[in-house]
Every structure is written in structure tokens, then in C-alpha cells.
Image (spheres, grey):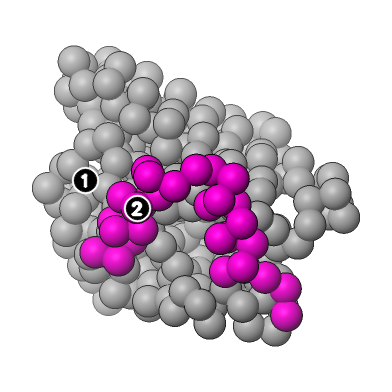
């Protein structure tokens, strides 16, 4: 039985993946900022699967969030075998019209907090000679994302960073994987204001369910794959074709796919 630390666990992919880990008899450290939701999920998983769950309340938008998490894990006297950075959010619309404070929060959650958690728990794993870090990138990381530019750029960062980190930690028995999903049916698009009310994205790129994606992703995790993994045949084809298309053309294509309604 291993202990998994999972951020972004109360909805969407994170919640679906928490159930996959729980059903496979892993204990879970559940990190979220919504107290009611994380406590409810913690009780549900513990009761249904007979595992130990440890809810941690933390807002990853805060600059010291990673320190808060690390300190609470130490106070619980727990060892993190698998770190899953699933938290993240996006912002839809023209960048210059967006709120700069919200853009900073996006970078903090999607990139800075992820990086710092990898740093602290990755060092522990390196010293022990074992561990697994799973970061959530996206097929977005391969494209310039018109109308969601900062989100796409953050996923490109996660992809590049994870591949490099995997190479650095491989000699020490620590594995790193960047998971790259496509469009998933989660509250993400509603929160980003990129759903069917605001854009054509979900019409032109039909989403799959979070539970279906989590099931496929967990099979990859069980095999302890490293570097990165694109989930779904259609997504693999899209990424492959993007190699042969100039970035400026891809930006134009994305502007059509994600056009405002």
C-alpha cells in the first residue's frame, strides 16, 4: 500500500483519479481549498475502499502553499510515494482584456506551486531512491492556444519541465510523468468561461468523461511510464500533425476552434 498526495482532488480529473487510486488500495493525502468538498470526498473514499485518507486544506494560489502542504505532511508523519499535481485552471478570452491578478494566480497554481511541490517531495524521493511524480500537462502544451494563451503556455511549461525532471531523477530511481489529456468533460470549461455559452470549443472538440480518462490514465500510471503520455488516439494524431504545421497557422486554427460565440 502506497501513499498518494493528490492536488485538485475535489472535481473533474482529480476527483476521478482519486477514486482509481483508492480502488487500488492506496492511501490518499487529499489537497483542496474547499473544506466541505474535500472532507466529503475523504469520508466517501475511506468508507467505500477501507483506505486511510488525510484531507489538507490549502489554496494553491498562495505563494507559500507548497510549504503549508509539506509542513502538514510532516506533522502527519507520512511519506509520499506518489505525488500527483492535478490542480489547475484556465482563463478564456483575449489576454489583454483579462484581469492581470487572475493571470498571476493561474501561473501560481499551474506552474509555481507544482514546481515547488516537485522540488520538496522530489528531494525526499531522491534520498529514498524511489518515488513517482505525475504532473498534468495537456495536448494544449503542444499548441499556441489563441484565447487561452496563458493556460496553453503553462501546460507547455509543465510538459518541458516534467521531461527534463524525469531525465534528472531517473538515475536515482524516481520516475516522472507528464499526462497529456485532450478535452475532458469537467467543470474546468465552465470556470474558465470557455463552455458552450461562451465559445465553440466544446462543439468542435467533443469532450470525453473524466472517469473514462482517469481509467485510461491509471493504466499508464500502473505501468510506471515516464517522460510524457498523450491519452487517446485522436489526441496523438493531432499532436503528430502539429509537427508539420507552422506555429502561426496552428494559432489561426485554434482561434477558429475556440472562437467566441
How far apart are the two marked residues, 2 and 1, measured between alpha carbons? 39 Å
Q: Main secondary structure of the magenta part?
A: helix
Residue in view at x 55 percent, y 51 percent: 249
Asked which secondary structure carries label 2, the reply is: helix
Classed neighbour count for the residue bearing mark 1: other residues with Cα under 10 Å, few (<14), some (14–19), many (≥20): few
For marks 2 and 1, the one nearer the N-term is 1
> Which region is colored magenta?
233-261
Question: Which labelled disc corresponds to residue 27?
Answer: none
Asked which secondary structure carries label 1, the reply is: loop
Residue in view at x 38 percent, y 78 percent: 209
Residue in view at x 37 percent, y 76 percent: 208
**Going by the picture, which residue comes out furthest to the left?**
223
When the figure is inspected, residue 179 is found, relative to residue 52, above or below; the finding is above
Residue in view at x 66 percent, y 46 percent: 150
Query: Residue 169, how many percent across, how many down?
Result: 27, 20
The one nearer the camera, 175 or 66, is 175
Label 2 vs label 1, nearer the camera = 2
Judging by the rendered image, the residue that carries numbered circle 2 is: 241
Judging by the rendered image, the residue that carries numbered circle 1 is: 2
Q: Is residue 222 toward the left or the right of residue 142 in the image?
A: left
The one nearer the camera, 143 or 26, is 143
Query: Can the viewer see residue 156?
Result: yes
Q: Is residue 231 magenta?
A: no
Amino acid at each position: 500500500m502506497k501513499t498518494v498526495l493528490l492536488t485538485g482532488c475535489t472535481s473533474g480529473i482529480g476527483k476521478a483519479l482519486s477514486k482509481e487510486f483508492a480502488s487500488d488500495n492506496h492511501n490518499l493525502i487529499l489537497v483542496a481549498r474547499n473544506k466541505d468538498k474535500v472532507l466529503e470526498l475523504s469520508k466517501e473514499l475511506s468508507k467505500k475502499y477501507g483506505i486511510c485518507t488525510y484531507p489538507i486544506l490549502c489554496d494553491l494560489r498562495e505563494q507559500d502553499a507548497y510549504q503549508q502542504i509539506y509542513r502538514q505532511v510532516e506533522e502527519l508523519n507520512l511519506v509520499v510515494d506518489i505525488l500527483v499535481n492535478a490542480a489547475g485552471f484556465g482563463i478564456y478570452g483575449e489576454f489583454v482584456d483579462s484581469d492581470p491578478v487572475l493571470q498571476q494566480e493561474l501561473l501560481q497554481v499551474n506552474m509555481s506551486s507544482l514546481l515547488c511541490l516537485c522540488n520538496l517531495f522530489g528531494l525526499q524521493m531522491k534520498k529514498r531512491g524511489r518515488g513517482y511524480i505525475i504532473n498534468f500537462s495537456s495536448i494544449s502544451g503542444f499548441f499556441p492556444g489563441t484565447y487561452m494563451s496563458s493556460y496553453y503556455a503553462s501546460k507547455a511549461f509543465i510538459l518541458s519541465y516534467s521531461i527534463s525532471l524525469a531525465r534528472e531523477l531517473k538515475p536515482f530511481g524516481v520516475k516522472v510523468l507528464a499526462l497529456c489529456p485532450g478535452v475532458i468533460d469537467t467543470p474546468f470549461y465552465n470556470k474558465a468561461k470557455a463552455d458552450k455559452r461562451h465559445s465553440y470549443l466544446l462543439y468542435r472538440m467533443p469532450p470525453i468523461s473524466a472517469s473514462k480518462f482517469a481509467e485510461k490514465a491509471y493504466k499508464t500510471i500502473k505501468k510506471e511510464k515516464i517522460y510524457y503520455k498523450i491519452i487517446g488516439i485522436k489526441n496523438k494524431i493531432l499532436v503528430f500533425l502539429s509537427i508539420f504545421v507552422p506555429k502561426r497557422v496552428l494559432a489561426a486554427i485554434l482561434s477558429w476552434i475556440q472562437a467566441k460565440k
